[in-house]
Image: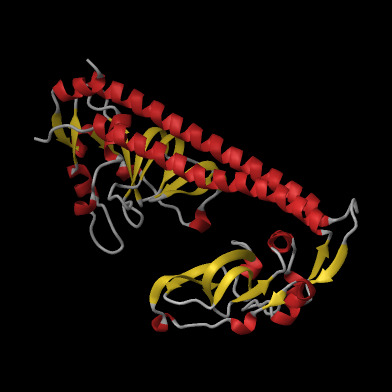
């Protein structure tokens, strides 16, 4: 008989949470920021660690459950933290301890992690008071079944955590490798090959005069991408560009913080507003080469304005670009394209893989914790 069959056939009691855990809220003690003495002990609030302090008021294994503020997730399950060791807890998180011989605390943690508490959270800001907390009903199978469920879910949690760590580490390594080779290829410090320096205005045709901003209310919904400073803003029913172009952010905070690429390629039928410069190149290799170089380059000397950063057309045209032969540009683009593909594939694949494993975990957790209600 497998564990699922055991669960389906085992006796289950439905009890209120207050019957199966010890609620230790009376021992909590909030400390204002100014009164905390810095140290190595985690100081917990409703949504996790708020600070680190010198002393502690709890030492053991506990479930922390948000009481007010951040108390509920998007799936309506409560904000929970599984904590072990010395901790300090303020009055914004309930603290639950194990009652020996009644229910395994880790089992209770897993049950609560998929329990819908939306009907007992009240007020603005949201609050899950102690009375409602204690009234939550959870299934209590025999201890040996609880142990088996915990063992399985612990292993699955460990697997998902390790996989996430490994994939994230792989992506970080590839990005570092990519940055290293990009910097080596685009710095032109070693003078391995002959390079001529030109202004961007000399190597590309500026088509800014063809741009046309349209207010949100004046746009008709369609299939053509409507581009702004950092990418697609909307989809409209008409286009003003048709072909391959390089867009460069003209204004906005992204010019300084660089959260998205400064330069990005567009193809086909598109519309561009007045927040992105539009450049046309003789061939796609020139365009890709300049694209890589601009996203590598420190553009701060060309940016004006502090409160509203702007890369105006005159400064854009004056940006100095290294211009080796088309053959050399092609080799550099090929190398960087390959690295970019690896990083993008990982970047796309990483969240997808983690999402799939998380869904797998949630599926089995639901199966393991599904008992027939009273």
Does 97 appear above or below 324? above
Residue shown at 29% from the left, 25% from the top: 149
Q: Is residue 303 left or right of residue 152?
A: right
Q: Position of residue 281 (x, y in %)?
A: 70, 69
Instruction: In the rendered view, tell whether residue 309 sits above or below residue 174.
Output: below
In the orientation shown, which residue stands out farthest toward the top?
Answer: 1
How many marks on residues?
A: 0
Say above or below: 194 vs 271. above
Which quadrant of the view contains residue 342?
A: top right
**Quadrant location, the C terminus:** top left
Q: Is residue 8 above or below residue 58?
A: above
Which of the 4 quarters of the picture holds residue 328? bottom right
Residue at 54% in and 47% down: 347
| Nearer the observer, 220 or 90 | 220
Can residue 341 be seen in the rendering of this structure?
yes
- Is 189 in front, or is 268? 268
Residue sitting at 29 percent across and 30 percent down?
A: 107
Q: Is residue 82 visible?
A: no
Q: Position of residue 300 (x, y in %)?
A: 73, 70
Return the x and y of residue 46 as percentages of the image width and height. 38, 51
The residue nearer to you, when weighing 205 against 276, is: 205
Percent position of residue 319, x then y: 78, 72
- Please give left or right for residue 71 compared with residue 173 in the image: left
């Amino acid at each position: 008989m497998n564990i699922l069959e055991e669960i389906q056939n085992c006796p289950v009691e439905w009890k209120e949470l207050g019957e199966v855990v010890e609620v230790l809220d009376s021992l909590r003690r909030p400390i204002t920021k100014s009164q905390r003495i810095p140290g190595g002990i985690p100081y917990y609030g409703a949504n996790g660690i708020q600070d680190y302090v010198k002393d502690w008021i709890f030492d053991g294994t506990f479930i922390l459950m948000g009481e007010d503020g951040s108390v509920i997730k998007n799936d309506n399950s409560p904000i929970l933290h599984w904590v072990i060791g010395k901790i300090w807890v303020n009055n914004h998180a309930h603290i639950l301890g194990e009652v020996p011989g009644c229910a395994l605390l880790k089992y209770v943690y897993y049950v609560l992690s998929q329990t819908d508490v939306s009907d007992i959270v009240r007020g603005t800001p949201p609050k899950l008071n102690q009375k409602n907390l204690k009234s939550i009903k959870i299934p209590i199978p025999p201890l040996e079944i609880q142990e088996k469920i915990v063992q399985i879910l612990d292993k699955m949690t460990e697997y998902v955590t390790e996989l996430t760590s490994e994939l994230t580490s792989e992506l970080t390594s590839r990005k570092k490798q990519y940055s290293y080779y990009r910097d080596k290829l685009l710095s032109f410090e070693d003078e391995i090959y002959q390079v001529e320096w030109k202004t961007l205005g000399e190597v590309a045709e500026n088509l800014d005069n063809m741009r046309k901003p349209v207010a949100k209310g004046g746009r008709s919904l369609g299939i053509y991408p409507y581009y702004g400073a950092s990418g697609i803003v909307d989809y409209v029913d008409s286009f003003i560009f048709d072909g391959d172009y390089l867009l460069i952010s003209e204004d906005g905070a992204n010019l300084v913080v660089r959260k998205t690429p400064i330069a990005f390629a567009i193809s086909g039928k598109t519309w561009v507003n007045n927040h992105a410069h539009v450049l046309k190149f003789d061939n796609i290799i020139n365009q890709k080469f300049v694209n890589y170089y601009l996203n590598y380059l420190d553009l701060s000397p060309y940016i004006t304005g502090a409160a509203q950063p702007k890369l105006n057309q005159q400064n854009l045209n004056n940006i100095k670009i290294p211009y080796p032969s088309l053959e050399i540009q092609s080799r550099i683009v090929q190398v960087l394209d390959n690295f970019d593909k690896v990083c993008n594939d990982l970047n796309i694949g990483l969240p997808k893989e983690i999402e799939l494993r998380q869904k797998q975990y949630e599926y089995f957790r639901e199966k393991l914790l599904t008992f027939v209600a009273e």
